[in-house]
Image (spheres, grey):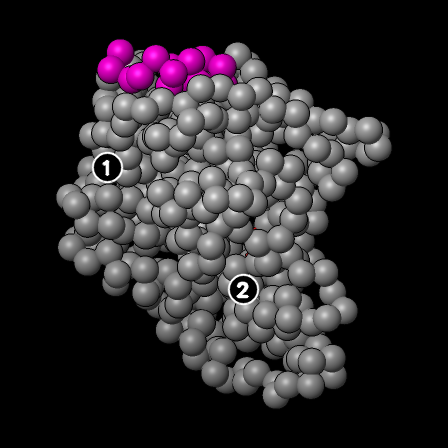
Amino acid sequence: MNLQNTAILGLQWGDEGKGKIVNYMAGDFGAACRYQGGHNAGHTLIVKDRKIILHLLPSSICHQNSLSLIGKGVVISYEALFSEIEEIGEHTSGIVERLKISPACSLIQPYHQLIDLKKEKSNSQKTIGTTLRGIGPAYEDKVGRRAIRVVDTLSEGQLKPVLEETLDYYNFIIEKYFNEKPLSLIELMDQNLSFGEKIKPMLADVSLLIKKLNAEGKKVLFEGAQGALLDIDQGTYPFVTSSNCSPTGIAAGAGCGPLDVENILGVVKAYVTRVGEGPMPTEIFDDIGEHIALTGGEVGATTGRPRRCGWFDAVLMKRIIETNSIQGLCLTKIDVLDGLDEIKVCKEYDDSSGLFLGECMNLENVSPVYETLPGWDRPTKSINSFSELPSEAKTFISYIEEVCGAPIKIVSTGPDDLSTIVR
Ligand code: IMP
């Protein structure tokens, strides 16, 4: 195989099954690199029959022979990072050599989580249904040029002035606006400095490391979190996350050039799901929606919230694929549709109000127009060869390729690695 630097990212509202695909492919690559988001992500892997849910660590972490990189576009919660490292058990072996983190990453601090919670619970502000991990407020600090970065926590002299200034700002809001007790500078200093000491051996210049790996002939897998429809610029604003989870975020967040990303694969589920608020034109409200949610185990991997389920939306996918240089698709969870009499795919929108302005993703006023395809009665679960799929499942796959305008290169028929068809 002629390996290239490859990006694997979700094209819907997250939870497309990226973790399985990255873990499946990671062994062939020198490294996998997370480049945006934080511990709001939830990537589920099955490794040696054990279910592992990762939030911040790249999905390559269980591969002893490849590096796991966290680029500067990721926002890190030290507490979440170190508890996740403990949770992966036997896979922590050699972690200091295998996990390399950019010292330029912004940190999520306790005040970010507090503000996220207060905003979401407030009656006066729009509820987004965030994961309450402090992601949005941490990115606000980054663009507001007051973030505490990993590098700041390596020495008391560097940390004190920046933390003091930022905490002054937050304590004002916490006391005057939210009527809560201010946070203690001393406690935050201690926490950050002790985590700084712990992370030190894992730090590396991730940008240069990517260059070095490529110079040695090793390729990098860029692992997206969330999905393109949750992208701050391209998604269903304001019901989005606070980073660029579409391919536009890779170069900035990993710290490489755009041309270093040679191959971009989009992961799409055979239906759509969404957690949190925001419009979803193909949402299914009847018992078929419940059946899909139950069969697909559609419960948030990070928050445990039930995911809303809907039919595959080819209108949104076609747009995302066209505008993001997507070269191929991985279609996941096709087995969840096993046994349905009919399967619907949204092929166009009825936009009689004329308000769906493509770039604004104004989905409130559109209604889906469906193509109805026949379901299949023979299970696809665990099938690993295309020719063995029921003919109706092959028709479904061809239809998605046709309406989306991209080839489906991988089909996933179950959570484990063996349940994978590579075409
Ligand atoms: P935040 O990223 O916690 O700020 O949440 C913003 C929106 O993104 C909410 O609708 C969340 O439910 C959604 N979101 C964040 N991370 C994920 C994810 O990994 N999968 C699915 N939805 C997510």
Q: Write the start and end of the magenta stretch as one range.
A: 387-400
Name the residue tied to disc 1.
Answer: 416
- Indicate the quadrant where residue 145 lies: bottom right
Q: Which of 96 and 330 is in front in this view?
A: 330
Q: What element carries label 2?
A: loop
- Numbered mark located on residue 132 in the image: 2
Quadrant of the rendering where the C terminus is positioned? top left
* Residue 121 visible in the displayed image: yes
- Numbered mark located on residue 66 in the image: none
**3D distance between C-alphas at marks 1 and 2:** 30 Å
**Residue at the image position 31 percent from the left and 17 percent from the top:** 390
**Residue at the image position 76 percent from the left and 69 percent from the top:** 124
Spot occupied by residue 153 in the image (x, y as percentages of width and height)? 46, 67
Q: Is residue 221 above or below residue 190?
A: above
- Indicate the quadrant where residue 177 lies: bottom right
* Residue 9 visible in the displayed image: no
**Residue at the image position 56 percent from the left and 45 percent from the top:** 285
Q: Which amino acid does label 1 sit on?
A: Asp
**Residue at the image position 42 percent from the left and 59 percent from the top:** 304
Can you tell me whether the CB of the residue at mark 2 lies under 8 Å from the nearest atom of ligand 1? yes
Spot occupied by residue 276 in the image (x, y as percentages of width and height)? 57, 54
